[in-house]
Image (cartoon, rainbow, N blue to C red):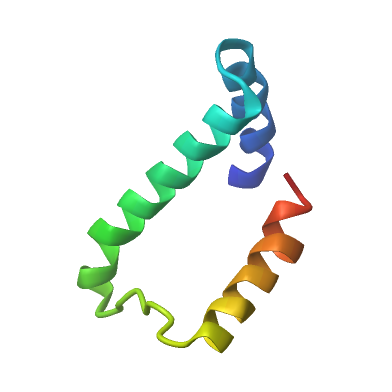
Amino acid sequence: SIWGTSFLGSKITLQFWGPFTASVLRFTLAILGMIMIFPFLGRTIAIPKTMKAWGKVALVGISGFGLLY
């Protein structure tokens, strides 16, 4: 499966770069992919406009991704 290969990719990447650099590279590639693919799918990336909305984004980022990494 595609998810199983991510552990192998992480292991190899961490031999060359630190964890922070590897994470930045991973998320940069994901964002660039979304920017290129979303227009073809008719989707947009919504930017939160209020502090309350940004708080929700931060909560998801910390609990869903930050603690994982």
Corner quadrant of residue 62: bottom right
In the image, 13 versus 57, the foreground residue is: 57
Q: Is residue 35 left or right of residue 58?
A: left
Relative to 62, say whether 45 is above or below.
below
Which image quarter is the C terminus in? top right
Which image quarter is the N terminus in? top right
Q: Is residue 4 left or right of residue 43?
A: right
Coordinates of residue 28 in the picture (x, y in percent)? 40, 44
Q: Is residue 53 left or right of residue 3?
A: left
Corner quadrant of residue 40: bottom left
Residue that sits furthest to the front in the current view: 51
Q: Please state the total of marks drawn on the protein image.
A: 0
Query: At 38% from the left edge and 53% from the top edge, which residue is drawn?
Result: 31
Corner quadrant of residue 15: top right
Coordinates of residue 23 in the picture (x, y in percent)? 56, 37
Relative to 9, say whether 57 is above or below.
below
In the image, 8 versus 59, the foreground residue is: 59
Coordinates of residue 30 in the picture (x, y in percent)? 42, 50
In the image, 1 versus 15, the foreground residue is: 15
Query: At 52% from the left edge and 84% from the top edge, which residue is drawn?
Result: 51
Query: At 69% from the left edge and 72% from the top edge, which residue is drawn?
Result: 59
Residue that sits furthest to the top in the current view: 16
Query: At 53% from the left edge and 28% from the top edge, which residue is drawn?
Result: 21
Relative to 18, say whether 29 is above or below.
below
